[in-house]
Structures are given as C-alpha cells and as structure tokens.
Image (cartoon, rainbow, N blue to C red):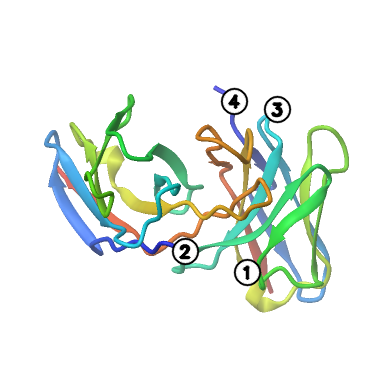
Amino acid sequence: DAKTTQPTSMDCAEGRAANLPCNHSTISGNEYVYWYRQIHSQGPQYIIHGLKNNETNEMASLIITEDRKSSTLILPHATLRDTAVYYCIVRVYSGAGSYQLTFGKGTKLSVIP
Amino acid sequence: EPEVTQTPSHQVTQMGQEVILRCVPISNHLYFYWYRQILGQKVEFLVSFYNNEISEKSEIFDDQFSVERPDGSNFTLKIRSTKLEDSAMYFCASSEAGRGSTDTQYFGPGTRLTVL
C-alpha cells in the first residue's frame, strides 16, 4: 500500500488560497490520489481525485507532480467553512471490485478571519 | 444531490446489548462500506459489501459484527454484544462501481454509538 505524508496542521487567511501538500513517494502506476475532508465529526466529504493529470472541480484543484510522488490540493479562496481535517489517500485496490480507503491523520486546516 | 443517509444519529446502549445501525446508500450504487472512528482517532475501514456478500473485511470486523442488505434500499451493521470499546462514530459509504475512476466513495453523516 502506498503511504502518504501530510503536515499535521496549517493555517490560512480567509479569502486566500490554501495549498495542502501530500507526499506519496511509493505510489504505483495504477493508484489514484484521493482527497477527502472531515469537518468536526461529520462524515468524510469527497473533494477530488486524480491519476496523473491536474484536476479541477467546483471545490478545489489537484496538482500532481510529473513523477507522481507528491500532490497539492488547492482551495482557491478559503472560507471559514473550509476549516477541517484534510486527508490525502492513495487508493488501495483490493482486487475484489471494492476497495478500502486507508485514512491517516490528515492535515488540520484552520482558516483564520 | 443524492446522499447517503444514516439512522439513528446517536445511539446509546448498555454493554452486552445488540445494536443495529442503518444506512440508506445512494440509490444506483452497488458497493457499500462501513467505517468507524473512535473519538480522536483515525477513520478505520470495517467491511465492504457487494452483491449480497462481504467483499473484504478488516481484523476489527470480528464475529460480533455482521452486515446485511435486508431490502433494496437499506444496508445495516449489527453488533451482537456491544463492548465499551465499540463506542465510536460509525460511517456508512457507498460507491457506484468498484472498477474505474468513477468509483468514488460517498459517506453518510455517521451514527454516534455510545456504549455504557
């Protein structure tokens, strides 16, 4: 299983871009990078995922380095509601058609007014 | 927007009692999952379910746990004889398919289980 490394915590000023890094140096060629977030004790919320190309949706952008050993989640204009724990997850394919997500400790992002 | 729902939001039970946690996955999804999160700890995978059988389970998912899809919409997690250490948030998730890039898991809001 590819493991991920994220900073324990980060601060971001409201209205500024939040850039959350993730290292996944042992990722294999067919593993995707997923980002989820968890606001307080709510259920994890899907944000975005990618394989090797950069991706953008209405919530965020995902930048994956060419060697795929690291990625950055970008929240372009952080708001107070973006305060959460952000998880970078490399998907483990179990071979049975389903797969489990392995959550680490994530990055606690605090958006400051 | 379709979402995963879970009931109850909070369940309090006595040690040794049986509990059933309920989930309604997104309607066209085929894969179902349970995760749990003990207070202050990581989210942990328990079990995945497809085509009316368990696809994969973790070592946490011992004989005290069982899952069932009793009808076309509900997905349940049963804990036969609860222990104090079963106190946690339990999250249900579902995904459209297991293969390909669209098999994103979507999570419900969780059930907080408190065992006294």
Q: Residues within 10 Å of mark 4 (few under 14, many from 20)?
A: few
Same chain, labels 1 and 3: yes
Of mark 1 and mark 3, the one earlier in the sequence is 3
Q: Residues within 10 Å of mark 3 (few under 14, many from 20)?
A: some
Determine the chain carrying the residue at label 3. Answer: B
Q: Residue furthest top?
A: B1
Nearest-to-viewer mark from 1 and 4? 4
Same chain, labels 1 and 2: no
Q: Position of residue B104 (x, y in %)?
A: 53, 38
Q: What element does badge 4 sit on?
A: loop
Looking at the image, residue A57 sits to the left or right of residue B88; the answer is left
Q: CA distance from mark 2 to mark 4?
A: 31 Å
Residue bearing the label numbered 2: A1
Residue under the point 66% across and 43% down: B6
Q: What element does badge 1 sit on?
A: loop
The amino acid type found where label 4 is placed reads: Pro
Q: Position of residue B100 (x, y in %)?
A: 55, 35
**Residue B69 lies in quadrant:** top right
Residue bearing the label numbered 3: B27
The amino acid type found where label 1 is placed reads: Ser
Same chain, labels 3 and 4: yes
Above or below for B87 versus B28 = below
Q: Position of residue B2 (x, y in %)?
A: 59, 25
Does the residue at mark 3 contact the one at mark 4 (Cβ under 8 Å)? yes
Q: CA distance from mark 1 to mark 3?
A: 29 Å
The amino acid type found where label 3 is placed reads: Ser
The amino acid type found where label 2 is placed reads: Asp
Residue bearing the label numbered 4: B2
Nearest-to-viewer mark from 1 and 3? 3
Q: What element does badge 3 sit on?
A: loop
Same chain, labels 1 and 4: yes
